[in-house]
Amino acid sequence: MRIDLWTMLKYLLALFYLLLLISCGEEKADGTKDMISERKQRIQKVLKAEIPVLLLADNDFLKETEQMELLGQLKNQDFFFDPKSRDPLLSEVLSITSLRPSERSDLHVSCRENCLRMELYNYALNGTLILTLDAERKVHSENFYPQMQGDLNQELANLAIEIAIRDSLVHSEYGRTLTRDDGVMQGTKTALNRTKCQRSRHLCAAPTFVKGEKALWVIVDLTDLEVAGTAWTQVGRTGMPVTERSAQNERMMREYCDRSSSLVKDGWRLEYAMTRSDGLKVYNIHYKGQPVVKSIKTVDWHVSYSDVKGFGYSDAIGCPEFSMAAVVAVEPPVVKEIVENGDTLGFSLVQKYHSDDWPIPCSYNYEQRFHFFRDGSFRPAVGSLGRGCGTDGTYRPVTRIAFEGTDQLFKAPDLRGNWTTWKEEGWSKESELYPYKEDKCMAEMQIDDNASYRIISNQGQLGDNSRGDQAWFYVTTQKNGIEGEGDLPTIGPCCNTDYRQGPEKFINGEGLKGQGLVYWYVPDMKNDGRPGQEYCWAESILINGKYVPKVYPCFSGPLLKYINYKTAL
Amino acid sequence: MRLFLWTGLLMTYSVFSHAQPCAGVPKFLEARGFEPGQAALSTSERRQMGLVLLSVGSKEGENASSKSYAHPSWDDQGYLSSITRDRQGHIYVAPKPNVNMLHTPRENLNTIFRVHAQNETMAPFQKLPGEVQISNENPYGILGLHYDCLTDHLLVSTVNGSTQQEEDGKVYAINTNTREVMPLVNHLDILGLAVVPIDGGQFQLLLASARESLVFALPVDIELRVIGPAQPVISLEGLGPRGDDRGRKMEYVNNQLIIYGTPFYFNLSAPTIPPETQYIFSRDESSGKWVFLSLR
Amino acid sequence: MIISVFFLLHLAERDDSIYYESPRLGHFLFFDQELSHDGKTSCASCHDPRYAFTDRYRQSFNAYGDPLATNSSSLLNLENFQYWSWRDTTVSSLHNQMKRPLFSQHPIEMGFNLDSIKILSNLYDKYSFLIEGMCSDEWNSDCVRKAISFYLAELKSRNSDYDKWLDHLHCDKWLPSFEKGIHVFFENGCQSCHGGRDFNEQEAAVSKVFTIRPPSLRNVVLTRPYFYDGRTASLSAALRNHPKHLWRADSSESIEIQLPQEKMQDLLTFLHALTDTSYLDNPLYLNPHEN
């Protein structure tokens, strides 16, 4: 077939327009991604440069090459590189402005006309370097301000808004998709001057979106390029910015503290709520429609640094405000699938807590993981992600499991390995001589004639790199169903090395028959800060120019393996 | 790494040479071999509960101690709050739980204890009016203690009974000679306290809120009679590294107000080194407003 | 030689009244924090009676939080010790051994010599009635060490289930695995280093080449963590990874005690049966300043 020139030209033009449409569409749809991707690529490139600084492109005073040359002359190169390892520390030029007369006294400079002020922020050190430059553009003074963040420039402000309006959390809070025109620019300017992000020590911005008489503050973490949290305020009442920690606290208190949420999944139905000082409590637990467990919670966290001197802490975990909690919940609980070799075995309900400035020494990071398996088994695991106050400490979290009903029988092997049904409240301790049954079973809670839970000892075989619990366990009665159900204050001292860990206070010789039973579990986990052998430990390491935590977690908790006698037969 | 366990951050720290001008030096200090200019009281030693007397370096900022002393009665109430001294050198403290409630007798959350300037013994001095309420939501009682030299009264704030929904804190002034307790403020949860003179022979009782980053001013006369309503006059919101500090303690020195700001959320603190920033304000006489100068 | 030195120490204080007083002075000194220059550390800070006179740290710490070189040793049944240091074979008496914790400066342990005049003066004020009987010639650090040596010589713990078994007491209560454990212990030659009455005596051929003193196995369950550097927290892990090179200077191998699970359990049962805490009923072993 012959194609004439005009036809060919038409086809080419059509192809050209088609390509144009596709590329424009991509750019528009992916505008945000491009901005964030571009930012990440820029960061990677800059970390390999001679001086790892994101330079200020748009300014009236210094070109990028001039900025780089100037920074190379600074005396304090430790601002750019870790003093020991010489790894790059990411920083950014936030602003270059004329030096105002009032700033001369603040910065103790005697600069005359045409002097400049250059502000750099270091993401790793979370500090600001302020330079004054004289008329010849030579460095007149250098002043470093730790834990201070300068004003954000327009590029960062734009980035913050884009991250905010693309976040699904923000959509659900606000109620619809947002655009740049939704009153964000004005709010951003106010927020930029006064908003600080403190818990993670990152650079943050708070673009604001007005809705009626309220405003939604979106805290954007510009170090990690994601939304950190949201909060509503009344417009005009305060006009005050909400810090990230306040936003987190408010959300936790509003949505999770003392408020019940429910979950139905994999044959399980349960409710959960953050308590004031007993961590996340999971309760009304049903399996296949049958109530099995009344509640599970972590009552205390005992941390001992000296068995001789008895020095340590007896922490509690829970709500971030108005509570007895010493280590507070910083984010909401999340549900995760348990997958092994490609098979989904169940799900975990995970709640994290940590103290400010973790993982510096003497900060704490705890985690509760409630594992629920499709076969009816469950495991309340609690762990530490470091760091603690010493390299030779012992962690002993106290977990309480209250069973449903009053027909339970508790059995454990005696010294000779024979199953014995406990008649009274009491306690026992795992040890090397403990007469475990098959599969490291250390006890059994028979819930009724048809089913029981085999309590499997955690000796590192449960898939979380644990080094074993060596736990004390106690069985008490529920005392008319109320004892211990409410928020408990700290029940035990930090540093006993015997059975007196707190639950023994509920033992008063009562008979177990016809009573609802409570199983308490207190593992004995020794931390280790020695290089190469870390356990229950954490430290900061430098990655891509910023410090990130590296954790060596320790988790404890028995597995309660469900045995249905009918199906087992 | 363990060295920091032993230096201990002396956050609640009363240095004898730097205290209020009228604060007397306890007689037992020298009897115990401490130099007033090089001694300090602390209630935040990491490994020792209660009150501790330390010898410190003469240089400012030096806090490594080589000698310490604590009378056996000084840890009877567990962890303690801020320290203040009166003209005779008697020391006033109150129980304030730290990390947990194990060592704090709850019935004494609203009781001020006094360490006698001569016999060193710590004993109950005055219990604030009302029943102590014990709650898992708010573990605190007395938070602020300040001996005011201008009016010669011990100022005390308590938040016992306050909840998330209801602010029920109170501020009292106590005559340390007669032990008369005078209520000043209701329904305000207050951390830091200070009295500053203003024009016309009047005074402002400054009250740093425990719930917000605000400082209220209550006009009072020399007898601490309230002569006007409390108004917010200073905001710490957005200032400093955290942006939402509460004023734990306030000092009015050389016409400047130093506010020691720290995070506070009515929960027990984890045993990290508590962060603190000093915010410095001065009062513009013409407008009567407090102006932020700097922080350190 | 060691025995003769110890014997001579006893001979020097042969007077009954003085001999009666000697453990008492040492008892007070052992638990007295004023023995250290900072007033915060006593011998008991690293040797707590509740843990068979150890402290349960991997490596002990001084008052400043500085780690010391080794794991804290038990001080029970010392009279049969051949050596009083983990690694230094020249420390041949308890009297000499105390020089390190009292006088060491790198790191400082108790720092006695940093303020010895003041310490001795304070101690004399407190214990003059005991000191005059013991050290009528001169009150000095030598006397302090002597007093504490006499006290430590009194600390014994040989009332474990194993001892009762040796005396044929309560035979019916023994677990079958306990007696099997004894056989496992001897069959595998453990007694070549952990022999004798207190399970810390080496056979002659072995003792010539050892570099680390084998500790006594009495109360071993209470004295974790294990080995001179506290590397292992559990007894079963210590058995599984027992380093051979610790005791043979010419070998870098580890003894991996390869035993079937059941025999390992029997051995553990036996080691547990070496536990005796009945001494805690005796005030001589407890802190006199608190009682």
Image (cartoon, coloured by chain):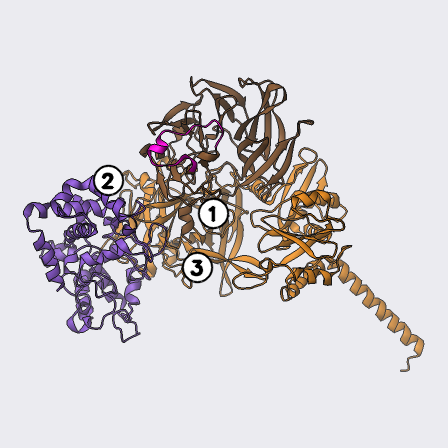
Q: Which chain is orange?
A: A
Tell me the chain of label 3: A
> Mark 3: which amino acid?
Asp
Work out whether residue A494 or residue C207 is closer to the camera in this orientation and state it. Answer: C207
- The residue tagged 3 is A464
- The dominant secondary structure in magenta is loop
Query: x and y percent of residue C287 in the render?
Result: 22, 44
Q: Position of residue A362 (x, y in %)?
A: 45, 49
In this orientation, which residue lies closer to the viewer: A480 or A316?
A: A316
What color does chain B have in the rendering?
brown
Which residue in the protein does label 1 denote? A289
Element marked by disc 3? loop
Crowdedness of circle 1 by 10 Å Cα count: few (<14), some, many (20+)?
A: few
Kindly indicate whether the residue at mark 1 contacts the one at mark 2 (C-beta within 8 angstroms): no
> Quarter of the image containing the C terminus of chain C?
top left
Q: Given the image, on which type of amino acid does mark 2 rest? A: Glu
Residue at the extreme bottom:
A1
Instruction: Pinpoint the chain carrying mark 2.
Output: C
Label 2 vs label 1: CA separation?
Answer: 58 Å
The part of the chain drawn in magenta is B19-37
Residue B88: x and y in percent read 41, 24
